[in-house]
Amino acid sequence: MSGFSDADLAEMLQAARSLGEVAEMLGLSVRQVQHHVDDGSLVAVNLGRGSVRKDLRVLDADLQGFLARRRTSAAKAATFESGREARPKPLSTQPTFAERRAARKSRQR
């Protein structure tokens, strides 16, 4: 048996969020949240009747775990200013063939 009492389970399920609520909190679409549930990166509880009439809910602990796994460090995240230096120079208003070709080549790297 699980280590939860009936009261604990009832309280956890009362605080469970629908996929729509999770999507709104995270700024995602419901379809994106559903894909996270389908691939197993976000755990959801099916309160519906089997696989045909699903009513998926996400517990707060599972949502916090999902967010913790998705967190990136500030050192890894590139800022806009650091990424700006690597950008190629803009083309002149009437670029020559050689300038257009050089610009295409620099984008391919």
Image (cartoon, rainbow, N blue to C red):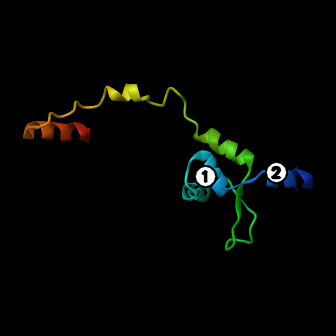
Q: Is residue 87 left or right of residue 68?
A: left
Q: Of the residues shown, which amino acid type is indicated by label 2?
A: Met
Percent position of residue 48, x then y:
74, 68
SS state under label 1: helix
Point out the residue furthest to the front here.
93
- Is residue 19 found left or right of 60 in the rendered image? left
Read off the residue under disc 2: 12
Which residue is pictured at 64% across the width and 45% down the height? Answer: 66
| Residue 17, above or below 50 | above
Q: Residue at x 72, y 71 (%)?
A: 50
Where residue 47 appears, as percent x and y from the top left, is 76, 64
- The residue pinned by badge 1 equals 23
x, y percentage for residue 101?
13, 40
Observer-side mark, 2 or 1, equals: 1
Residue 69 percent location from the top left of the image: 61, 41
Residue 38 found in image quarter: bottom right
Q: Earlier in the sequence, mark 2 or mark 1?
A: 2
Q: Report the residue at 65% width, 51% height from top.
A: 22
Q: How many marks?
A: 2
Q: Amino acid at mark 1?
A: Ala
Between 101 and 41, the one lying in front of the other is: 101
Res. 78 visible in picture: yes
Q: Residue furthest bottom?
A: 52
Q: Identify the image quadrant of residue 49.
A: bottom right
